[in-house]
Amino acid sequence: MDPLSALRDYTIRGDLDKIHRVGDEFRFSTHYSFPCKSETAYRSKQGNLYTLETLVFFIKNLHIKQPEYIKNSTNQGIPPVTYVDRKPLLDYLEGRVSSSEAIQFVLPNATDVEEYRPDDPQSFNSIPNNNGVSNLGIEDDSEIRVLEEGGGGGGEGVDLMGLIRAREKPLRDRNAVLQVRNRDFYGIYVGALRREQEKPQQRKEANVGGNKGRPLGGEKDEGFHSGPKAKMLKGGGKIGEGVPIILVPSASTTLITIYNVKEFLEDGVFIPTDVKMKQMKGPKPECVTVQKKFSRDKDKVMTAYEVRDKPSTLKADDWDRVVAVFVLGKEWQFKDWPFKDHVEIFNKIIGFYMRFEDDSIESAKVVKQWNVKIISISKNKRHQDRAAALEVWGKLEEFVARSRS
């Protein structure tokens, strides 16, 4: 990972306190370390690339005013972030925007790299660095002998592939390679799981009915079958069978909507709805799948939830799967719901009301009469969003566990 991406990741997660300076390098917990003076991919409007030292000092001193920040930065010999770059840089580091025109990742100049010829082993060692040592760690005047099957010569060979692998840095692992922006593979997983759960019932019916054309055992199973509906994530109690549902208001004036709920619940970052609507390409999603990705219990298995904002489209069986609702604070939100009053609603469904911490008490006057959890977030301190998201998950998981017991 490059220094800029690492700093942005730690800023969004609220882990800036885990970035420490040790000598001439910054250590990001136990995951990464970069030289303090290393240039990042963020280019200032003056034309120069900001160093990691400049960006770390900037993001850790947001609480002080610009003149004092400039003074402290100059006293420590750290080039400051210019005033015109402050807002766009801060928006990027705190995750309010996903990209910026100021970010320019520098690619290697093709003229600086010599062509590699498989029949010329010396090409591995042909590019020296500043110390006169090749990028593989072999001195320029050293002799490279390629060991060939059946070859002789009696000399000690050099494992070229071993040298290459020793310097490799993995960019993706088997989990990260499946993380595609604006794509959700949960539906594929649900379909595969459903077919696996249908097979025992199909075998039973085949044995009773004399195996009338149904696939058994290792026989090829094409698509879905007309057998009994699969029972997934069965919890018993008050919660119905299937993937649990969370309802959010369809009005864009509320803090949490179907546009930004995924970033808030999965990443612990609040992004305003209007910002997400401008970033989103294509039509408004009818359903979003969310899953808790951060937890104090690393071994805990997390459940996926469907998020919807159109209660009118829910069927009777779907209402049995509704476990939570983000309330707007308006009575009309619950019009045509299959419950007689608010008492019944919030006995069967846990309610959350999101508000800014400095909003007037009057805004929550109606909500305080309901049995809902009020969650407060800051308008500007995005590093505090994670705690609010964890509070939502904690209340939700506690409610689900109690309902299923």
Image (tube, rainbow, N blue to C red):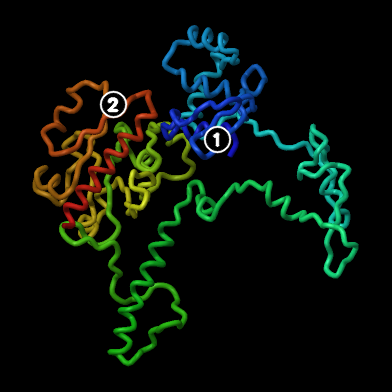
Density class for disc 2 (Cα within 10 Å; few <14, some 14-19, many ≥20) is few
Q: x, y percentage for residue 373?
A: 19, 37
Identified by mark 2, the residue type is Phe
Q: x, y percentage for residue 43?
A: 63, 24
Query: SS class of the residue under badge 2?
Result: strand
Where 57 falls versus 26 (above or below)? above
Q: Which residue is mark 2?
A: 356
The residue under the point 69% across, 33% down is: 106
Q: Is residue 153 visible?
A: yes
Q: Quadrant of the C terminus?
A: bottom left
The residue under the point 27% across, 46% down is: 247
Q: Residue farthest to the right?
A: 153
The residue under the point 20% across, 57% down is: 239
Identified by mark 1, the residue type is Ser
Q: Is residue 273 visible?
A: no
Q: Give the mark, 1 or 2, whose residue is nearer the N terminus.
A: 1
Count the marks: 2
Q: Nearer the viewer, residue 294 or 263?
A: 294
Where 1 falls versus 383 (above or below)? below
Circle 1 or circle 2, nearest the eye: 1
Q: Nearer the viewer, residue 147 or 334?
A: 147
Q: x, y percentage for residue 300?
A: 33, 52
Q: Which residue is mark 1?
A: 5
- CA–CA distance in space, label 1 to label 2: 29 Å
Q: x, y percentage for residue 7?
A: 52, 31
Q: Nearer the viewer, residue 146 or 380?
A: 146
Q: Residue 381's quadrant in the figure?
A: top left
Q: Quadrant of the N terminus?
A: top right
